[in-house]
Amino acid sequence: MSITVASVSANFTRDLEQNYALIADLVAEARAAGVSFLAFPEAAIGGYLSSLGNHGDTIKTTSRSMPPAVRLDGPEIARVQQLAGDMILTIGFCELADDGETRYNAAVCLDGQNIYGSYRKVHQPLGENMSYSAGDTYEAFDTPIGRVGMQICYDKAFPEAARMLALDGAEIVVSMSAWPAARTATAENLQDDRWTYRFNQFDIARALDNQVFWLASNQSGTFGSLRYVGNAKVVDPGGNVLATTLLGTGLAIAEIDVAETFRAMRGGMFHLRDRRPDVYGPVAALDGAHVDGWRELAHA
């Protein structure tokens, strides 16, 4: 059975009312196109950090420039559910833990009636740990359109993260980002920027590695010192980009048939079946000689 899916490229800031209005517009546009599953970017509720690294606005003990922290069962998420209606969507936000202090860079999958799953970002780049605590789990979950897994931004650079979701049965992996251009020697045309290149290559590789559908959403425009690269896309299990926004804002829309594509793609070479876990031991080792050697060089 074919379904229509879409990934969002758009700019989200600290202005929650503006964010909700944008979410409503994009949901309406997607609904008009027959979309049943829609992926919003990382930090779509309240925006991302205004800078990366130790620049004085990303410290856990201050609220200056920080995204608003909301609870998974709070009114902010409920409002997104009202906008979603019968559409399933994923969206990023800053989650406030039950202790009322700990923050996570998080995402949730929901529709108007259900919360199907949530995720807390595991891999933290460039001082993000000064603003958020890290998650520690990759789990897929069932939805009416298939089994879904979620990642956030830097997670896509780690093959193990996507493989964990694939091994848990994910058919669709959503990678939500606030992925910026390079901080130094930025290309004049952002489509040619080296960080744009990495963003796109990771999406293709992770889809092909695991033979899953891959929905990559991203922020666009600018926020604080960050200039985002857009390039929301839908990638099939063969690594083919079915739709992309490139640098623009809007929706990357594609029609997919999960069951039929899996029969075709996995009928011959099936990467998950053909793995050799018996020789992968060092991959999961907490420390290794080569890793330790690089640590010594980095701190020399």
Image (tube, rainbow, N blue to C red):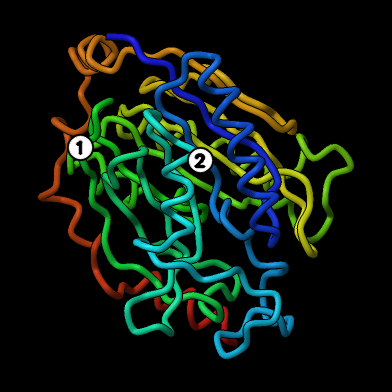
Image position, residue 21 (x, y; %)? 65, 42
Report the residue at 30% width, 40% height from top.
113
Q: Quadrant of residue 282?
A: bottom left
Disc 1 and disc 2: Cα gap in Å?
Answer: 25 Å
Image position, residue 59 (x, y; %)? 61, 85
| Residue on which disc 2 sits | 202
Q: Secondary structure at mark 1?
A: strand
Q: Quadrant of the N terminus?
A: top left
Q: Secondary structure at mark 2?
A: helix
Above or below, 56 against 83 in this view is below
Residue 66 lies left or right of residue 282; in this view the side is right
Dot 2 surroundings within 10 Å: few (below 14), some, or many (20 or more)? Answer: some
Above or below, 165 against 96 in this view is above
Residue 204 lies left or right of residue 116; in this view the side is right
Report the residue at 55% width, 85% height from top.
60
| Residue on which disc 1 sits | 142
Image position, residue 169 (x, y; %)? 18, 37
Image position, residue 7 (x, y; %)? 53, 31
Q: Residue 287 versus residue 110: which sits nearer the camera?
A: 110
Q: Earlier in the sequence, mark 1 or mark 2?
A: 1
Report the residue at 15% width, 31% height from top.
274
